[in-house]
Image: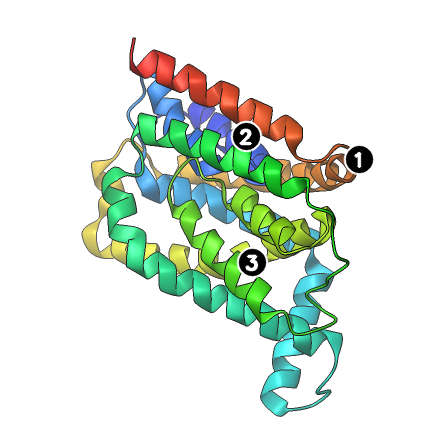
């Protein structure tokens, strides 16, 4: 890998992480389209670290309120505060994600990066997203009441994003819209929900990398990772800002069209 390819990976991650078109699917497809050596899951995960940092910066007030809610829950203060209710719903969703990820992760690592499987995920979950987006929101909020059923559904759906092509933001926004959340409410909860999973994965994988010296056996070095993370962070902040504005006006249909077209292209090339 060169510095320019590392920059390109960061650019792709920064754009696609927050658009419901699957960042992991696009990262896995770069070697497929450009005949590069696949940098692997570790490098992809580090690109996700850059966009996780973008979420922390852009939603810093929400993150602060989340920590306050956790504190209220632990100390049993402010029993009905919006921060406490949000922290409870957030925790339920995170636990559901972690549990299901542990169940399916081995299968995903063995078969998830197959181009045909990615194409299927892009199309199927893209169409499901369009159907869910047509649902009229019920005015529900993850901060004003206990929404354990919604939290479980959104959390469980996030685990499916371990398969490239599903799209973490796409499938969690879909679950939120099916449950009656507005586009913006579903998007905000979706973005914040990614933080525990990404940071936990980076910490877990970092220990594994150090023990196995995995980077020494790949074409990726620390400099490439630093470039990719920096670019994905900067581009990620811009993408969040403009995606939320665009989403409120247009909806998710245009992303479904993109996903279906990309899926058809992948299948055509794979079977050529």
Q: Is residue 174 above or below residue 255?
A: below
Residue lying at 30% horizontally and 59% vertically, measured from the top left: 103
Camera-side residue of 139 and 47:
139
The residue that label 2 is drawn on is 11
| Label 3: how many Cα within 10 Å (few below 14, some 14–19, many 20+) | many
Rendering coords of residue 211 (x, y %): 21, 57
Residue lying at 19% horizontally and 52% vertically, measured from the top left: 212
Residue 49 relative to residue 186: left or right: left
Q: Distance between the residues labelled 1 and 2?
A: 25 Å
* Quadrant of image for the C terminus: top left
Camera-side residue of 142 and 209:
142
The residue that label 3 is drawn on is 193
| Label 1: how many Cα within 10 Å (few below 14, some 14–19, many 20+) | few
Residue lying at 43% horizontally and 37% vertically, measured from the top left: 24
Q: Earlier in the sequence, mark 1 or mark 2?
A: 2
Residue lying at 25% horizontally and 47% vertically, measured from the top left: 107
Helix, strand or loop for disc 1: helix
Check contact, mark 2 vs mark 3: CB within 8 A. no
Rendering coords of residue 13 (x, y %): 51, 35
Name, please, the residue furthest toward the top. Answer: 272
Residue 173 relative to residue 98: left or right: right
The residue that label 1 is drawn on is 249
């Amino acid at each position: 890998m060169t510095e320019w390819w590392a920059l390109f990976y960061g650019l792709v991650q920064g754009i696609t992480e927050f658009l419901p078109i699957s960042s992991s699917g696009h990262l896995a497809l770069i070697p497929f389209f450009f005949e590069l050596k696949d940098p692997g899951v570790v490098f992809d995960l580090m690109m996700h670290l850059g966009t996780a940092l973008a979420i922390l910066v852009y939603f810093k007030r929400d993150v602060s309120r989340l920590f306050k809610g956790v504190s209220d829950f632990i100390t049993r203060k402010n029993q009905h505060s919006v921060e406490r209710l949000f922290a409870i719903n957030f925790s339920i969703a995170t636990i559901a994600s972690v549990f299901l990820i542990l169940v399916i992760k081995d299968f995903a690592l063995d078969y998830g990066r197959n181009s045909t499987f990615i194409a299927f995920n892009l199309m199927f979950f893209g169409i499901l997203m369009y159907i869910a987006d047509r649902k009229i929101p019920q005015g529900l909020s993850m901060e004003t009441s206990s929404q354990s059923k919604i939290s479980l559904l959104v959390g469980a759906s996030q685990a499916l994003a371990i398969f490239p092509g599903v799209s973490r933001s796409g499938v969690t926004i879909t679950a939120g819209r099916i449950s009656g959340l507005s586009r913006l409410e579903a998007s905000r909860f979706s973005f914040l929900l990614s933080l525990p999973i990404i940071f936990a994965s980076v910490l877990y994988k970092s220990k594994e990398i150090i023990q196995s010296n995995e980077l020494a056996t790949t074409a990726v070095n620390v400099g490439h990772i630093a470039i990719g993370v920096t670019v994905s962070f900067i581009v990620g902040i811009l993408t969040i800002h403009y995606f939320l504005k665009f989403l409120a006006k247009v909806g998710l249909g245009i992303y479904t069209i993109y996903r279906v077209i990309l899926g058809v292209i992948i299948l055509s090339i794979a079977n050529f």
